[in-house]
Amino acid sequence: MTAKTVTPRYIVPDVMKAIDPEAPGGPEVLVLVKRAVPHPGAGEVLVEIAAAGVNRPEVMQRQGKYPPPPGAPSILGMEIAGTIVAVGDGVGEEQIGQRVCALITGGAYAEYAVAPFGQCLSVPEALTMIEAAAMPETLFTVWTNLFERAYATEGDTVLVHGGTSGIGTMAIGLCAIFGIDIIVTAGSKAKCEAALSLGATHAIDYKTEDFVERVKQITGGKGVAAVLDMVGGDYVARNLQCLAEDGRHVSIAVQGGANATVPLFEIMRRRLTLTGSTLRPRDTAFKSLVADELARTVWPHVEAGKLKPVIDRVFAFADAPAAHARMEAGDHVGKIVLSMT
């Protein structure tokens, strides 16, 4: 293996270990292979990865159900934490050596990855690299959907499904910081207890309780200001029953079905808003704007140790199949992370 000196401090190899399945399949296709180390382009940085978050879209990509966006690396993984070891044009060399976490379109399951510098956030002393790797995807998703698209604000009550998922646990943490009451749903009594222990205002076991009726009871019949939904299907019409007048419904996934039948007159009568988004295909300019907003509004709380991700389990890089198997089993509470060290 040849190597080239990038700076007096870092030597970057030409080849790295990565997980880049040649064909869709089960967790067993997640084997380590050799790939060329990528080079940062204009406005980009090369990060030596210490840890990478594991997310459901990566499970779907592995299964062949969610292809990466055009131009994205085929190597799996969307969030990283590590050290900048090289920079592209337009990024100052003083950034080399900085600890960062970043949201990327692909390439995280590797020893090195390229990230747009605008999508990087500095890793403060309050976070370990494992924790930092568990932040970007859920933080960007919850912020852009619950706080920007649904306009959740201090004093509101919101409903978030999947309360013990990475998204759900991040929503709980952010709502606690910004003075928002959060009702979550989860699939067992134990998961509901876990959500409450993390700071959820209320937790509903959707397998034993009707969440529509429980939301009405909790809110005294008023309903919630916003719903963050990752289920879709027949949940959408039920979610609308949970909304207060002028309420906002935001869809971020369709795990329960991509089609829904909704009562249009009720939407008109109560002035409800239905919206949604997918984050991964959005361009670098948009994600960089989100990163700037997070750096101003949320990151001071991270630096102060007031917001941390909930870590379910950490797996060694070579144990990625076990990490995906755990996510598919649905027993996790919080984030699953791969450690490269």
Image: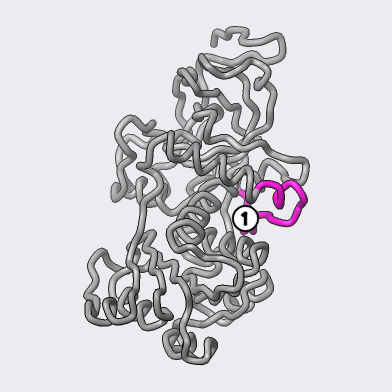
Q: Which residue is mark 1?
A: 313
Task: Depth check: give the residue in front, 258 or 248.
Answer: 248
Give the amino acid type for the residue marked by disc 1 in the picture: Arg
Task: Depth check: give the residue in front, 291 or 255.
Answer: 291
Residue 322 in sight in this render: no
Whether residue 247 is situated above or below residue 136 in the rendered picture: below
Please identify the quadrant where the N terminus is shown: top right
Rendered residue at 52%/35% (across/down): 119
Magenta stretch encompasses residue 300:
yes
Rendered residue at 52%/65% (across/down): 152
Rendered residue at 41%/81% (across/down): 242
Magenta stretch encompasses residue 328:
no
Secondary structure type for disc 1: strand
Return the x and y of residue 16 as percentages of the image width and height: 52, 23
Return the x and y of residue 302 as percentages of the image width and height: 70, 50
Q: By what rule are the colours in the image chosen? A: one colour
Whether residue 260 is situated above or below residue 140 in the rendered picture: below
Task: Depth check: give the residue in front, 79 or 331.
Answer: 79
Whether residue 341 is situated above or below residue 220 in the rendered picture: above
Q: Residues within 10 Å of mark 1 (few under 14, many from 20)?
A: some
Residue stretch rendered in magenta on the structure: 299-314
Please identify the quadrant where the C terminus is shown: top right
Return the x and y of residue 293 as percentages of the image width and height: 56, 45
Whether residue 97 is situated above or below residue 228 in the rendered picture: above
